[in-house]
Image: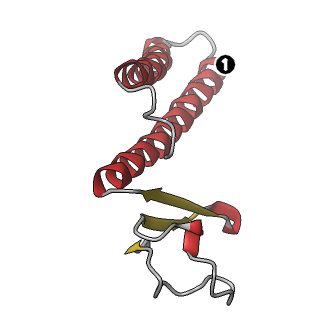
Amino acid sequence: MPIVALADESTPPVDGNSQDTPCEAKEGEIYVELNEALGSTKCIKGKTGIDFIKNYISQIYVYGAGLVGLIAVFSIVIGGIQLILRGEEDNSAVKDRIFKSFIGIAILFLSALILYTLNPTFYVLE
């Protein structure tokens, strides 16, 4: 579970070196360490509470968009397999699912474009 903390002189060191703070956070920065797949760690930090919340929401969007994209592609692949295996049966439901998956991917890309247009630094961790 991620723990949100404020980096200061009393922050415990990561590797026993008293000069290092977790995530290489500077004194006064708010940070959170997230454990990712394969044992890697992602650090989200910000100079102020607003910066931290912006960076955190940005990362939530990136992970959510990736998950939605994977589900949509998986749905297209499953629909394609069903379309092949059904032969000449009624395929309107399968074609509709594939079409809706493409629409979902288009909405995902358009939402990213709108977010980038409103704030070009949305995807940049500060």
Q: Is residue 117 above or below residue 77?
A: above
Mark 1 residue element:
helix
Question: Residue 77 is drawn in which quadrant?
Answer: top right
Q: Position of residue 100 (x, y in %)?
A: 42, 18
Q: Is residue 3 left or right of residue 43?
A: left
Q: Is residue 49 above or below residue 58?
A: below
Camera-nearest residue between 93 and 8: 8
Q: At 50% from the left edge and 19% from the top edge, which residue is drawn?
A: 98
Q: How many marks?
A: 1
Q: Is residue 64 above or below residue 120?
A: below
Question: Residue 117 is drawn in which quadrant?
Answer: top left
Camera-nearest residue between 11 and 27: 27
- Tell me the quadrant of the picture where the N terminus can be found: bottom left
Q: Is residue 36 above or below residue 63?
A: below
Type of the residue with mark 1:
Ile
Q: Residues within 10 Å of mark 1 (few under 14, many from 20)?
A: few
Q: Position of residue 59 (x, y in %)?
A: 46, 47
Q: Is residue 125 left or right of residue 56?
A: right
Outermost residue, left side: 50
What is the image's colouring? secondary structure
Camera-nearest residue between 88 and 97: 97
Q: At 41% from the left edge and 74% from the top edge, which residue is drawn?
A: 3
Per the image, the residue denoted by label 1 is 84
Q: Is residue 24 left or right of residue 104?
A: right
Q: Position of residue 75 (x, y in %)?
A: 53, 31
Q: At 53% from the left edge and 87% from the top edge, which residue is drawn?
A: 12
Q: At 49% from the left edge and 17% from the top edge, which residue is drawn?
A: 102
